[in-house]
Image (tube, rainbow, N blue to C red):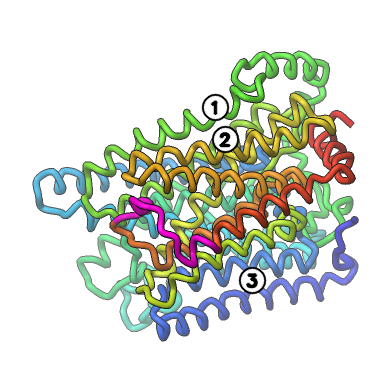
Amino acid sequence: MQESRLDWKNPTTTMLLGLIFTVLTYISGRLVSMLAVRVGWDPNMTSVITRTLLGLGFIVALGGKSWLRFDLKAIRDSWVLTLPFVMINVVLATIFVSMATVQIVQGQLDAATYFGGLGFVTILCVFVGINEEAMFRGLMFGGLLAAIGNKKNGPLMAAIISSVAFGFLHVVFDLHYDNPYNVVQGLLKTLECGMFGFVLCVSVLETRCLVGAMTVHSFFDWVVLAANGGSLPTTYVNDNPESSIAGIVLYLVLTVLYTPRTIKAYKRLKAMELPQYGPFVQEESAPLANTARHLAAKQQEQTSENDVPAKIGRLRDNRLLNNKYLTIIGIFTLFFIVVNICCIPIALLTTDNVVRQVCAAILSIVLSISLAFWYQHHFADEFDGMLGWSTTGLLLGLPCLTLCLGNMVEWGSSTFNNPLLALVLGLAPGISEEILYRGIPGSNWMRLAGEKEDVLPCVLVTGLAFGLVHSSNLLAGASVSATVFQIIYAACIGIAFQAVFLRSGSVWGPAIIHAIIDATYFLTANMNNLALSKELVFDLSFYLTCANAVVLVAWGLYLIRPQKRDEIVALWKRKWHKA
């Protein structure tokens, strides 16, 4: 179905809507944060999540969905252009973290306090990177381009306006105009942030993609906050003379260091062909940047076209990925080993089990997504990927939410944990398990044996493998009976989610449903002991779980019934460029 867009011949309407939606997104986040304080939720997290959802929704509503696509090349190009900014802050962060580590070793700083906030700010930075790019590079910059993108200096002015707004918003509510130290800090902070925003504007215009800028922005913010031990800055400017001078020097140094890359981005922006109408207009009216880099890349792509068969042949020589069963075992084992090795320093740094769980959760998310990127890059010449969005996958996974009933039975007599903690711990298995146990094994199975008779074995084998992984609960102190039940129950879940994945070709639908189910469990779970009970308890929750297991298997088998297997095979042949 062709994506609906606003008529680019009505640029004023598009520009006004872009600006209005930017302001509306920001104000909504502020209002929600005030409500969050009343109910005891974290105002920062609730605010950025609200802005993220609204920002992305408004971009799609205006017809800019194409700029939200997942494109590895676009992400790489964004990182290449902004790398000096990131590396400068990585160096500064390394210095601050090294100083903090020395203080921890000397006993002058508590490790749990310092590292405990890192899990929170990691999730926060992901949402901040997405929502601020959606607001300033998507809605504001894109809206301005729709109106002035055909003017001689239109793209330049659009980039400057959105970048200044981006920088000024970081300090506007903390400026005291009667204090010269405060004002100078505010101006330099606006300039420093604005230069970063300007380079991101050039990046999204060159790549026609916001996702690359979002990843850069999220990592950039995370590095800054990680250097601060996970503590959020209350303000970027202050009135204290000594602190003000330190801030002025820091912002001035960063501005000087940012200048060369900003000038380079300016030259690349000026070299672009006109018009540049942005994401909310017909793509054919917005040519790609006519820079030497893009021309060279295009020539390189044309030159390497004849090498594609050879590349594909080399990719298929990989022994791990060239066997359906070995892929499943190898991916499971590799992930298990890496996560546990990486958790060793976390365990040495803190005895707080909650901190350990959050760090392990974030680590599993990062590693699984990295592994998915590697797999898609490995088969970039022949595979469309598993990380694209699919509404079908989300809808087909909704019946699995019945699993929440067993978790909710415990709510009546339990104490609720922090909802943010439950969300983080729910996202970890939701994302990592769907990528590792459904995404990569299922995709590789359909690559190697993608015919009708291979659909059912794919679902059953990967589901059983997912169940067998839970035999490791014996190491956590669970009884044999409880472990066997968990294996059967997890296998039933694996069958249902693998069927949803094969029908949709995307991990995100199952991942979201999976995360919601687990989050309802972590709302009342004992954070100091997340292992299974030592003995199987035959209570209401147990019987609900059994009923759900039967329903999930039935639903999974129904989704891959013989009448649908031709459709499934056709989908995967298209994804693997076999059709």
Question: Can residue 14 be seen from the camera position used here?
Answer: yes
Within 10 Å of the Cα at label 3, are there few (<14), some (14-19), or many (20+) other Cα atoms? Answer: many
Q: Nearer the viewer, mark 2 or mark 3?
A: 2
Helix, strand or loop for disc 2: helix
**Amino acid found under the numbered disc labelled 2:** Ala
Disc 1, disc 3: CB below 8 Å? no
Q: Secondary structure at mark 1?
A: helix
Task: Tell me which residue sits at (78%, 47%) in the image.
Answer: 503
Q: Considering depth in this image, is 464 or 285 the residue closer to the camera?
A: 464
Instruction: State the image quarter where residue 20 is shown.
Output: bottom right
- Left or right: 437 with respect to 39? right
Query: Which circle's residue, 1 or 3, is located before the other in the chain?
Result: 3
Does 166 lie within the magenta span?
A: no
**Disc 3 element:** helix
The image shows residue 250, relative to residue 11, as above or below, that is above
> Which mark identifies residue 465?
2
Return the residue at label 1. 329
Give x and y (percent) for residue 458.
Answer: 70, 34
Of badges 1 and 2, nearer the viewer stands 2
State left or right for residue 575 relative to residue 484.
Answer: right
Q: CA distance from mark 2 to mark 3?
A: 39 Å
Q: Give x and y (percent) for residue 489.
A: 55, 49
Principal SS element in the magenta part? loop
Q: Amino acid at mark 3?
A: Leu
Q: Residue furthest front?
A: 538
Which residue is tagged 3? 54
State the CA–CA distance, disc 1 to disc 3: 40 Å
Magenta residues (range): 529-543
Distance from Cα at disc 1 to Cα at disc 2: 8 Å
Which x, y percent locates residue 184? 36, 69
